[in-house]
Image (tube, coloured by chain):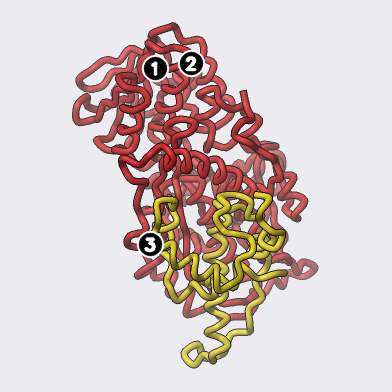
Chain colours: A red, B yellow
């Protein structure tokens, strides 16, 4: 908090001096090629073309969590939610296709899997996403993600859950264990239940879905429940923590044990508690709290200068952990880094978020908000945070479903500088 | 989408390009009219970058921004979105987060040609 004020006062508005002999270009290294990291890379290169921008990301292409529920439900092929880095590379971003093994935040050094010499930089941006934490649930182990796929990082896990649902017996039970806040994509478990229900309605009409929830409330709850009653009456059973207690244990027969109940599953989707990606927790940038604190004015870590952290790894409340949030946070961060490189004044934070969710292919709902800083804290602008109305007509829900698809095409084009033509007809 | 003219296709793309800001004055408390104008414009570019996340860098999607709108018409439309009709889904909520005094500069940034 104090840091931000000091930064503003101390803003000597000349370009930072990058006076290492023989190297005039400021170096920016971004770790993590998801919505936060990829957006930051592209925008820093655009806004500060003199910078040398490197993106450290082991994958050749990124598979998005947004729209992965459509893959789980068999409505889309996974290729249609996969984006490579060629657009960013064409824009001048260097893709270093290896993992960051560890970082030294003070020295701004990045140790790579593939190289013994660390990368050094002037600005380090970390967008590591989440780590799944099974510790609190007895009976979990290395095989748990295979047997009870989380599908909370898109890719192989998404396909594994998809194939288990396809193979589920007629009239079987699909159990989703939803974690307590905070976690990646707050409406995700409920959208998943909705789209799987739409799949079951056609292919497994006697199937049941049970959501064993670590919460007593969830985002857009009334809207989801209205949609479930209308589209999938009797199929989805939501069980809150006040009724069943905490999830304590799972076993090899796919039984979920809470304090008061047992839920045997034919297919189990265990979405465990989460914390910031290992690269930041192992370097202490989460302060031991599991999520990283940042200056909301520029997303610089409160624990290390010239180290910026974005996306799901950050405690950016009241913003939710969403792709949209990560994308908008990255733009604020990029503008701030570019301003420092270019010697221009720092800018006020302005961010938006809209979380669209699909209750059915032609039934969309949303929650949105606008976020600024006030008294050096991140706040939602009054009246900006709200959801779609209850009781809206079919045309309204159809319009929001269309906008969900339009939004997906827009954010992926913006983030990955992708030219992919994606229609919502594409897919399996 | 065919109805949207090429002019607006470039509209959001320009937001992505660099901002050329003036050299700041030595004393921030005695800003000239020009400096305040440029601050407002820089702030509007920050706001405009958030539009891209839904409306696409090419302004292809959620195409509620008619392509032939000029600056005044776009400013009027943005202000009108504060009081939604039944076709508006999220924009009235997002407009609640944008100050009315930022609208002229935002409309200028969104309609400028490269």
Up/down of B69 relative to A113, above or below: below
Mark toward the viewer: 1 or 3: 3
Q: Which residue is mark 3?
A: B83
What number is the disc on residue A394?
Answer: none
Q: Is residue A14 left or right of residue A310?
A: right
Task: First in sequence, mark 2 or 1: give its number.
Answer: 2
Secondary element under disc 1, as helix, strand or loop, is strand
**Residue visible at 39% across and 17% down in the picture:** A174
Secondary element under disc 3, as helix, strand or loop, is loop
Q: Which residue is mark 2?
A: A165
Marked residue chain, label 1: A
Q: Nearer the viewer, residue A305 or A245?
A: A245
What number is the disc on residue A174?
Answer: 1
**Residue visible at 49% across and 60% down in the picture:** A299
Q: Position of residue B100 (x, y in %)?
A: 43, 73
Secondary element under disc 2, as helix, strand or loop, is helix
- Image quadrant holding the C terminus of chain A, namely top right
């Amino acid at each position: 908090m104090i840091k931000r004020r000091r930064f503003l006062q101390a803003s000597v508005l000349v370009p930072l001096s990058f006076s290492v002999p023989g190297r005039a270009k400021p170096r920016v290294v971004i770790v993590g090629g998801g919505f936060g990291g990829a957006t930051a890379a592209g925008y820093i290169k655009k806004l500060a073309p003199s910078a040398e921008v490197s993106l450290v990301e082991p994958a050749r292409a990124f598979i998005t969590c947004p729209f992965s529920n459509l893959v789980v439900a068999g409505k889309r092929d996974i290729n249609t939610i996969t984006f490579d880095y060629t657009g960013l590379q064409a824009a001048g971003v260097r893709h270093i296709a290896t993992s960051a093994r560890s970082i030294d935040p003070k020295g701004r050094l990045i140790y790579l899997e593939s190289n013994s010499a660390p990368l050094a930089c002037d600005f380090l941006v970390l967008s590591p996403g989440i780590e799944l934490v099974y510790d609190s649930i007895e009976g979990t182990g290395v095989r748990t993600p295979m047997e009870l796929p989380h599908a909370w990082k898109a890719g192989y896990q998404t396909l594994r859950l998809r194939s288990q649902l396809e193979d589920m017996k007629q009239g079987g039970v699909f159990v989703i264990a939803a974690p307590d806040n905070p976690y990646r994509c707050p409406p995700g478990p409920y959208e998943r239940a909705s789209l799987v229900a739409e799949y079951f309605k056609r292919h497994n009409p006697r199937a049941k879905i049970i959501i064993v929830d670590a919460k007593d409330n969830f985002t857009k709850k009334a809207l989801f429940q209205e949609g479930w009653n209308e589209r999938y009456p009797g199929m989805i059973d939501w069980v809150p923590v006040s009724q069943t207690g905490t999830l304590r244990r799972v076993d090899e027969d796919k039984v979920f044990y809470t304090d008061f109940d047992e839920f045997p599953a034919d297919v189990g989707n265990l979405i465990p508690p989460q914390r910031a990606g290992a690269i930041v927790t192992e370097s202490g940038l989460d302060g031991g709290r599991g999520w990283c604190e940042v200056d909301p004015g520029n997303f610089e870590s409160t624990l290390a200068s010239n180290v910026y952290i974005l996306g799901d790894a950050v405690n950016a409340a009241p913003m939710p952990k969403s792709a949209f949030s990560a994308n908008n946070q990255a733009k604020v961060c990029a503008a701030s880094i570019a301003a420092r490189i270019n010697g221009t004044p720092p800018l006020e934070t302005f961010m938006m978020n809209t979380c669209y969710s699909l209750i059915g292919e032609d039934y969309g709902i949303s929650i949105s908000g606008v976020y600024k800083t006030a008294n050096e804290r991140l706040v939602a602008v009054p009246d900006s945070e709200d959801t779609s109305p209850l009781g809206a007509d079919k045309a309204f829900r159809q319009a929001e479903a269309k906008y969900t698809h339009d939004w997906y095409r827009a954010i992926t084009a913006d983030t990955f500088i992708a030219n992919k033509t994606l229609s919502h007809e594409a897919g399996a | 989408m065919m109805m949207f003219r090429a002019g607006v296709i470039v509209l959001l793309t320009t937001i992505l390009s660099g901002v050329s800001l003036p050299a700041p004055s030595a004393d921030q408390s005695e800003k000239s009219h020009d400096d305040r104008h440029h601050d407002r414009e820089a702030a509007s570019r920050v706001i405009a970058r958030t539009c891209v996340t839904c409306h696409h860098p090419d302004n292809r999607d959620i195409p509620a921004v008619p392509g032939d709108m000029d600056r005044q018409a776009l400013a009027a439309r943005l202000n009108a979105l504060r009081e939604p009709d039944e076709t508006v889904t999220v924009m009235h909520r997002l407009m609640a987060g944008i100050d009315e005094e930022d609208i002229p500069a935002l409309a200028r940034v969104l309609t400028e040609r490269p």
